[in-house]
Image (tube, rainbow, N blue to C red):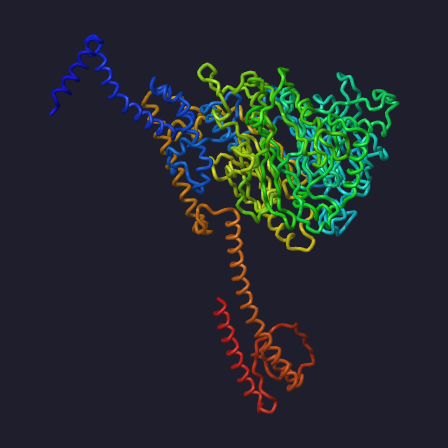
Amino acid sequence: MASPIMTSNLSSSFTLIQETISPMTWGLALRRRARTRRAKAPTEQRSKVLTHILSHLPASSLSDVSLVSKSFHKLITTPHAWRSAFSRFFPGRERLDHGGIDHDQLELNEKVLSERRYFARLSPLASWRSEYILRTRLLRSVVRGKPLEAASTSVPDPASPKAQVRYNSNLVSTVTHLHANYDVGSNKKSPRFIHGADELGTASASDPRLGKVDTWGFQDNSSFQQFTDLFPGDTPYGLGPGELVGLPNVMDVSQAFGMVYGEGHQEESVLWYRHIEEKRGRSLLWTSLPQELEHGIPSLASDHANCSVWVAKSTNVPELSQGLVGILAGSSTGVLTAYSPGTNGLRDRRLERGQITARWVLSPGVPLIAIAVDEQLSKQRLDAGRIWAVVLNALGEAFCLETMPDRVQSDQKVDYDNTSQRTPSSLERLAWATGRTVHWKLIEPTRRTARIDPFEKTEIDGSYTPRSSWTRMHLDTQQLVAETLEIERFLQKKPKEFRQACYGWDMRRRLEVDFAGHVGRDAGEHILIVETGLDEGTSVSMKRYTRCQVKDPTPKTSSFDIPSLSAASNRVEAERGSPSLFGGKSNKDQSQPWSFESIEPVSVSPTSSFVEGHQELFIEEWRCSGFEFEPMRDQITCSTIDNSKYAVLNAFEDPLLTFSGSSTSSSLSSSPLGSMCTPSSPNNVPGCCARFVAIGTKTGAIFIYNIRAAVSGNALVENTVTPVRIIHTDSPQISCLAMTALYLVHGGNDGLVQAWDPLGSSLAPIRTLNSRFSSRARRRLIQAEASPAGVGVNLFAAGAISLDPDPTVLRGMVSLGSHLRYWSYSSATADQYKGGKRRLRRSQRGSNQSSDRFSGTGRGALKEYIANEKLELDRERKQKRKEDERLAGRFGLDLLGPDASEEELLAYATLLSQESAQSDELQRKKSTSSSDTITEETEAEVSSIGEEVDDELAEAIRLSLQHPSANPEASSSDVRIQYTKRKIPALPVPAKDDIDDDLGFALRLSMAEQESEHSNSKGKGREM
């Protein structure tokens, strides 16, 4: 019971409320609140249930449901419904964790709904609706494999596009490099391909629409030698005794600029370049200068090997460098050289094709094994201080470059624009001076690791290496001479000395770089270094290094000058006053050792701010991540990265994040801009702006990772990146890979080429592009691996794959030995595939007329049409069942189950043929043994007759057998009869002494004849 005080308080409060609010307003508020409480919970629950139900519908049906009512339209147009449907159709990591589950068995719980989906989108202005609809239709187009529809003309075109075209590249060895410049825009034309074989250093070009190879590349009669030809028996890659650096010849091709080829041995190796517009190639300059210490030019030996080459695939880098950088070549001496791809009439400078333009010494004595360059480089990226080139050496050290070299006039007496005054010496001297205008930075976490040497047995320091300085270091002549002498000392070292002093010598590492990554403040480039584990003593390892901009914990006092946007000007401020290893005055303590890496500059962001006289500085920091790789004993054979159109866009170039991006394309499947808001970060974009990288192994497995996965929050902590999907193929070894935002294509060393969905909509390949001779190739590879000679040149293997960077255009090419297979599937007609319905059938029962569409009207006609459809389906099921039963009864096809593969069926057929052959052989042996037994007995008894009975008596016996009714006295006839040799039944002939008279002898012969006939009849019965 309530107390009087509580009652009075309640009544006073109620009176105050009544005085404040009018009675009518109070009543309406109470009724509205009651209705809201009753309707809110059922509405939310109903929306969740409907969303869960609608997520099971295909894209076309889900769009049709939005036309039912306003509530359904509101529910369907929200991103949550389409995201749920996308998560159900593309389970991603959920399918990988459960070991492969079907769509019908996948329970869509809250974890799956809330899990982020990482993928590269297919359209510039993507939404969950457009991604779900477009991706499912394009995958269905790949499965169907319909060719592109040619324009309808009155005259038939013999070169009309086909779904697949196979032709010969006219190259003798296996094609290992492919490249094509695919047209952009709505009116895409057939691309032109360039294909090269690094075994012989040959290349050719072709038009896949015609299936013909051009004459380019076949008029160059240059010949090259391999390392194994000159040094048979020596271990390549600097292993073994470690006296030589040798590897297979390296090659790179470009449809825009031709091919570059380098020999991988140290016997006056040649670097060859042939432009796409030239019939014959030319040898690129290595060195022609002696030692010039005052100019910082060391003496380079001629016994070097070309370990890596790169040629520009587009005109972006040559244009932004004013023609200075179009070709890069890495040497076994650690020297990187840049060459020009040719002159341009719009430029002020005149550069010849293949002219040397810049040179750097990055790691003297250590080979440069990989080069990666940003093919999508733009002026905006350069102004933002983005990395555009990365080089990797044999010790795992990575060097990056942010600025473009600038050509300087090193010799005022030489006019370099005048062809008559250009000499190899002057051009090389100018290249050394041009290289000093930029600074290659060493990525600090990749620095070489020295071995423990307590007794100082090694002559070199395993943790230090000199390299070429740049002009902003302001070295005087004395310091420049000391630097050059130290570089020459390292250039004379052998691979064995670096292996003794340092850990991690591996010349078979692979390099993949994401130049478009973004983690804030114009940083976020991801550098992936892959250790393949192919050499003895090495293991598989994958490390990703991400560049970050973090705040400087110790802000410095600064004037109110505007901070420079150039990263190079900020390095000058950081490097002033630094002590030098080569002498010179300094304000700091000279006892502290100095190195090139100790002057790592401080990068100032363009958005730096001033707060109370202090400048907010950001320093550069590299953070490391490890990629999870479970079978540590496996070996990596190839790798690839997604180069789709929208995967290579930076954050400030993405039209979905900033509508001022460089992309001007649009998509008909994109959501209208008026009904959606601009995402604030890449995490709010469908797919989170991910970019996939794929790794192929020696056991036929493929590991797919997101190279833009979460970065570690601390530079001292290394996080782990798990694979997005693991694919197990039927190929014994993965030889090449290629990937777009839609699908991944793998090529095996057995010639099997298949397309896969990285998001896991199907565990099986969505399409097999080539499987001819794959079974035969596997058997021959097993035999070749067991032989002492090894596999050698494998003409079955898939050497290279090229895909259209536009993921909505389904075309590409794969090389199979010296042959090429080009495919081009229709994707423009994907909109008409509204479901997985079967083809339309006859409209009337018993009619022979066929119609493409249902033309009847009215409810009765529709019911009759449905009845006809059901009747034909039942008839087809019965016919198929009878055919399966007939085949199963005759050949036993149902013994292996419905999921039997082609290999299992072939093995079963071989087993049946072996059993049949064994049974036939057994019957043949039985018949042969019985006939041989009779023949042997006959021959033995006839020989005894010849021994014991004279010739006249033996002749009488034979005549009596042939003519039993004849008179025995006829044997004394003078006419001699000759008989052919034939097998006669065994006859027990009595001895000569036992013969009393002719009558007794004749009786015994007749009895023997009956017994022989009786025994022959029994033998035939046993054979039957």
Would you say 91 lies left or right of 267 here? left
Classify 93 as above or below 610: below
Q: Quadrant of the N terminus?
A: top left
* Residue 603, picture quadrant: top right
x%, y% of residue 9? Answer: 17, 17
x%, y% of residue 605? Answer: 60, 22
Residue at the location (39% across, 34% down)?
A: 111
**Residue 663 appears anywhere in the view:** no
**Residue 687 appears anywhere in the view:** yes
x%, y% of residue 724? Answer: 50, 37
Front position in the image: 158 or 712: 712
Would you say 50 lies left or right of 901 here? left
Total numbered labels:
0
Front position in the image: 511 or 665: 511
x%, y% of residue 135? Answer: 49, 28
Classify 291 as above or below 523: below
* Residue 513, picture quadrant: top right
